[in-house]
Image (cartoon, grey):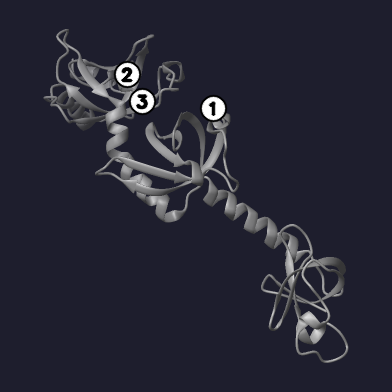
């Protein structure tokens, strides 16, 4: 008889594993316990999970995610879910769990790390309020103020509804459940990268037609394009020595300039 029992065990399962599995099945389940469990059933209103215990676990649709756009259809049998026990018995012998609550409890530490690392998040605008828009990060409601939505003034926030947006976390306050993000910060970084790339393509010796944008005591800033300017030092304005750039140039003048230096993203012109 003992030989038969031994041969029914799979090679991967030792007697210790078998004993641990039996012990786990009789373990008392309490409110607040966290389980990482496998989905064994999905219906329109709930998900059934295997707790490796004397009973099964149920996660109601409303306890799966805090994101209104979440669909229970995105969960399949065989998926692994982490959820926390919110009721030991629903009256029918099942344990009730909440994935949403488990997500929230672990989310704020992740949000703080994302903020510190400057993580760029791919999100979708899920709602519009008076002062900005709502997005959901791992099922947690986040807010992007209108002033942090774009590089330019946003007149109609409704135009952003359901649109994709990239943003960074700028505030993650777990105590106040306050998650604030900025899409403008991402846009500024991209604009700076594009500007640096354009400047790096400019070669010493290149000649441009530019516009005198601003005159200072030591020279003039010449606008070469929408986002690129260079410094025309007073000594490079003309062949003769002058005391003031105003003797030769005024703001708005068109001038031809040659690039004589391109260092650390700064252009020197002549």
Tag 3 and tag 2, C-beta contact below 8 Å: no
Of label 2 and label 1, which has the lower sequence position? 2
**Quarter of the image where one finds residue 25:** top left
Specify the quadrant that holds the C terminus: bottom right
Measured as percent of width and height from the top left, residue 57 is found at 24, 18
Q: Residues within 10 Å of mark 1 (few under 14, many from 20)?
A: some
Residue 150: give its label: none
How many numbered circles are shown? 3
Residue shown at 52%/51% (left/top)? 185
Is 225 displayed left or right of 144 in the figure? right
Q: Secondary structure at mark 2?
A: helix
State whether residue 225 is above or below residue 157. Answer: below
Measured as percent of width and height from the top left, residue 152 is found at 60, 46
Q: Is residue 155 visible?
A: yes
State whether residue 180 is above or below residue 264. Answer: above
Q: Residues within 10 Å of mark 2 (few under 14, many from 20)?
A: some
Q: Secondary structure at mark 3?
A: loop
Is 44 displayed left or right of 208 in the figure? left
Please state which of residues 191 and 25 is positioned toward the viewer in this rendering. Answer: 191
Of label 3 and label 1, which has the lower sequence position? 3
Question: In whole angstroms, how far apart are the C-alphas of marks 2 and 1?
Answer: 21 Å
Residue shown at 82%/92% (left/top)? 241
Residue 62: give its label: 2
Specify the quadrant that holds the N terminus: top left
Residue 65: give its label: 3
Q: Residues within 10 Å of mark 3 (few under 14, many from 20)?
A: many
Question: In whole angstroms, how far apart are the C-alphas of marks 3 and 1?
Answer: 18 Å
Please state which of residues 48 and 15 is positioned toward the viewer in this rendering. Answer: 48
The residue indicated by pointer 1 is 162
Residue shown at 40%/20% (left/top)? 78
Q: Secondary structure at mark 1?
A: loop
């Amino acid at each position: 008889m003992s030989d038969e029992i031994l041969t029914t065990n799979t090679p991967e399962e030792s007697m210790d594993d078998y004993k641990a599995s039996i012990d786990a099945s009789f373990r008392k389940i309490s409110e607040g316990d966290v389980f990482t469990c496998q989905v064994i059933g999905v219906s329109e209103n709930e998900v059934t999970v295997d707790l490796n215990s004397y009973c099964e676990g149920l996660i109601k649709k409303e306890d799966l995610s805090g994101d209104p756009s979440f669909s229970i259809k995105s969960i399949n049998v065989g998926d692994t879910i982490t959820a926390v026990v919110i009721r030991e018995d629903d009256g029918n012998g099942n344990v009730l769990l909440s994935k949403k609550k488990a997500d929230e409890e672990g989310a704020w530490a992740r949000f703080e790390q994302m903020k510190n690392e400057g993580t760029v998040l791919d999100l979708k605008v899920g709602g519009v309020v008076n002062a900005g828009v709502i997005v959901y990060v791992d099922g947690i409601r986040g807010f992007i103020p209108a002033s942090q939505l774009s590089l330019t003034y946003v007149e109609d926030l409704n135009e952003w509804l359901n649109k994709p947006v990239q943003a960074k976390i700028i505030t993650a306050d777990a105590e106040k459940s306050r998650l604030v993000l900025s899409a403008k910060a991402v846009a500024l970084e991209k604009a700076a990268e594009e500007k640096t790339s354009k400047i790096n393509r400019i070669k010493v010796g290149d000649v441009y037609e530019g516009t005198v944008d601003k005159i200072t005591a030591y020279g003039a800033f010449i606008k070469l394009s929408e986002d690129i300017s260079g410094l025309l030092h007073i000594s490079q304005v003309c062949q003769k020595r002058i005391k003031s750039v105003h003797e030769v140039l005024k703001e708005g003048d068109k001038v031809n300039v040659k690039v004589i230096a391109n260092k650390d993203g700064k252009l020197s012109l002549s």
